[in-house]
């Protein structure tokens, strides 16, 4: 398969076909594209053009296109569809994707859309999923799955599986339940094919099966599926009944969203925004941390102003090294916090906080000494003042150690308090280390130089 490439020429060609109402040619062209590619194309069209394209194609394909496209564009397109047309799209989707779209609809039309769905069992499953928080396993799961009863024989099992599989896009696993629908285990396809048709399922199923509760956080589900390399995982309710399954495609979306959120937090953006959002929305997301940076800058100014005597006694060169000290403090802090945040995200951190801090102190000391030797030689050769060079170099070692400890402690502390530690890799850690770095720098320099 040739990789899809979106070009200006392709968009212009599609726009021309839409303008000329050459529907047959447009349908023929769209047959060549995957639904994810068409979603990407739609996002480059105007809202009217994208709506025209969706209405032109069959629901079997447009339902997947709608599920794949940007939420804002999907919302605009759905506003131009009738409740019956929306219901037709939902009928073609798995229940988890359908529930996601329904949750975005205006509340005043949700009931009408649900009532227009002809498959009442499908409609019931969608409504059932709407009661779960979107950030939980219940909010991620789909109702479509293949399950068999433990007291069935193999022949009955195969017949029932054929019926159930018609509504499942892809069969990842066969789950075994009792008469109360409580999850008992999973069934190997190989065992099913090599076992006598009269054998009961309870005699051949595998009792060991990984599962999650409907209230499990999405991030925890992602960790479990990633750890055990699962393509799908069953979901049970509070009393152990099998109520759905989560597939790897949904978990990939969770991981991506979490990575995007952490990246934005690390960059000092407090809200979930995109490049195409309005100036007001982007300002709201960026301003809080920019304001913190401003406060930090004022704090640094106040600290430096308190060391005016140093400047007056002929050590003005110390002020020339403040950008270097501040930069090193910020860089070391971000490096340390980034490693800790990554470890927390992957559940790789072992041992106590004290042990982690001791390790970081030794690491920072080693790095600081290596850098300080180079800086000592440079300042000495440049200024011909060994005592000044020693003061700046000692300050650098101290600043790096403190920055490393802060960068390690803060994300661990935030995680213990239930706060996303990714916040500690951005302006928060940089600003705090800048302030502490400058304070330590001038205090040590003043002490060494006897000012």
Image: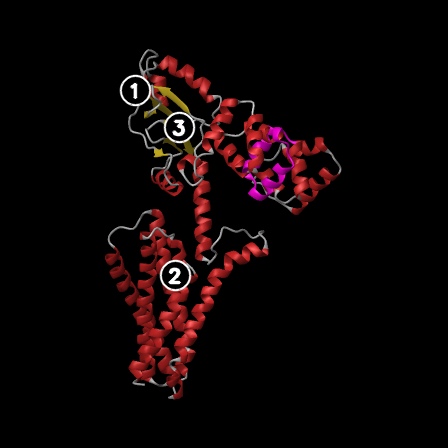
Residue occupied by mark 1: 204
Could you tell me if the residues under marks 1 and 2 are in contact, i.e. CB atoms within 8 Å? Answer: no
Q: Nearer the viewer, residue 348 or 373?
A: 348
Q: Which residue is mark 3?
A: 243
In the picture, which quadrant includes the C terminus?
bottom left
Taking the spot 34% from the left edge, 32% from the top edge, the residue there is 211
Mark-to-mark CA distance, 2 and 3: 43 Å
Closer to the observer: label 1 or label 3? 3
Residue 334 circle label: 2
Q: Residue 66: percent from the left, percent from the top? A: 57, 36
Q: Say which element carries label 2.
A: helix
Secondary structure mostly seen in the magenta stretch: helix
Closest to the observer, 172 or 220: 220
Query: Sequence-wise, which precedes: disc 1 or disc 2?
Result: 1
Screen quadrant of the N terminus: top right
Query: Which is nearer the eye, 41 or 373?
Result: 41
Q: CA distance from mark 1 to mark 3?
A: 23 Å
* Contact? badges 1 and 3 (CB < 8 Å): no
The residue tagged with tag 3: helix, strand or loop?
strand
Q: Is residue 1 visible?
A: no
Between 356 and 24, the one lying in front of the other is 356
Task: Give the magenta part as a residue range.
Answer: 57-84
Q: Quadrant of residue 378?
A: bottom left
- Identify the residue at the far bottom of this view: 313
């Amino acid at each position: 398969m040739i990789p899809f490439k979106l070009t200006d020429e392709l968009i212009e060609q599609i726009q021309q076909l839409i303008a000329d109402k050459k529907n047959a040619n447009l349908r023929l062209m769209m047959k060549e594209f995957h639904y994810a590619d068409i979603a990407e194309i739609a996002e480059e069209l105007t809202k009217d053009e994208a709506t025209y394209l969706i209405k032109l194609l069959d629901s079997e394909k447009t339902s997947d296109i709608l599920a794949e496209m940007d939420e804002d564009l999907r919302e605009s397109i759905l506003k131009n569809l009738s409740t019956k047309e929306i219901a037709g799209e939902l009928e073609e989707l798995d229940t988890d994707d359908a529930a996601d779209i329904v949750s975005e609809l205006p509340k005043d039309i949700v009931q009408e859309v649900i009532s227009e769905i002809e498959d009442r069992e499908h409609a019931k499953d969608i409504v059932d999923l709407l009661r779960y928080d979107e950030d939980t396993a219940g909010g991620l799961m789909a109702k479509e799955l293949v399950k068999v009863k433990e007291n069935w024989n193999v022949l009955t099992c195969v017949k029932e599986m054929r019926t159930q599989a018609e509504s499942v896009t892809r069969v990842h696993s066969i789950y075994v339940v009792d008469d109360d629908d409580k999850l008992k285990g999973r069934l190997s396809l190989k065992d099913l094919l090599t076992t006598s048709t009269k054998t009961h399922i309870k005699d051949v199923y595998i009792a060991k099966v990984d599962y999650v509760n409907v209230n499990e956080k999405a991030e925890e589900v992602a960790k479990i599926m990633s750890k055990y390399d699962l393509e799908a995982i069953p979901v049970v309710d509070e009393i152990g009944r099998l109520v759905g399954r989560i597939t790897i495609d949904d978990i990939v979306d969770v991981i991506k969203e979490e990575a995007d959120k952490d990246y934005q937090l690390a960059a000092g953006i407090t809200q979930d925004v995109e490049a195409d959002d309005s100036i007001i929305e982007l300002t709201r997301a960026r301003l809080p941390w920019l304001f913190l940076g401003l406060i930090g800058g004022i704090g640094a100014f106040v600290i430096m102003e308190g060391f005016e005597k140093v400047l007056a006694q002929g050590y003005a060169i110390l002020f020339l090294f403040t950008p270097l000290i501040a930069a090193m403090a910020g860089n070391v802090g971000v490096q340390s916090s980034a490693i800790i945040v990554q470890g927390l995200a992957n559940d790789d951190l072992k041992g106590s906080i004290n042990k982690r801090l001791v390790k970081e102190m030794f690491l920072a000391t080693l790095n600081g000494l290596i850098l300080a030797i180079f800086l000592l030689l440079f300042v000495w050769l440049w200024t011909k003042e060994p005592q000044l060079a020693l003061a700046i170099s000692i300050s650098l070692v101290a600043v790096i150690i403190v920055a490393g400890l802060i960068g390690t402690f803060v994300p661990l502390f935030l995680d213990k308090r239930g706060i996303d530690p990714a916040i500690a890799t951005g302006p928060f850690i940089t600003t705090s280390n800048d302030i502490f770095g400058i304070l330590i720098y001038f205090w040590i320099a003043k002490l060494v130089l006897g000012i």
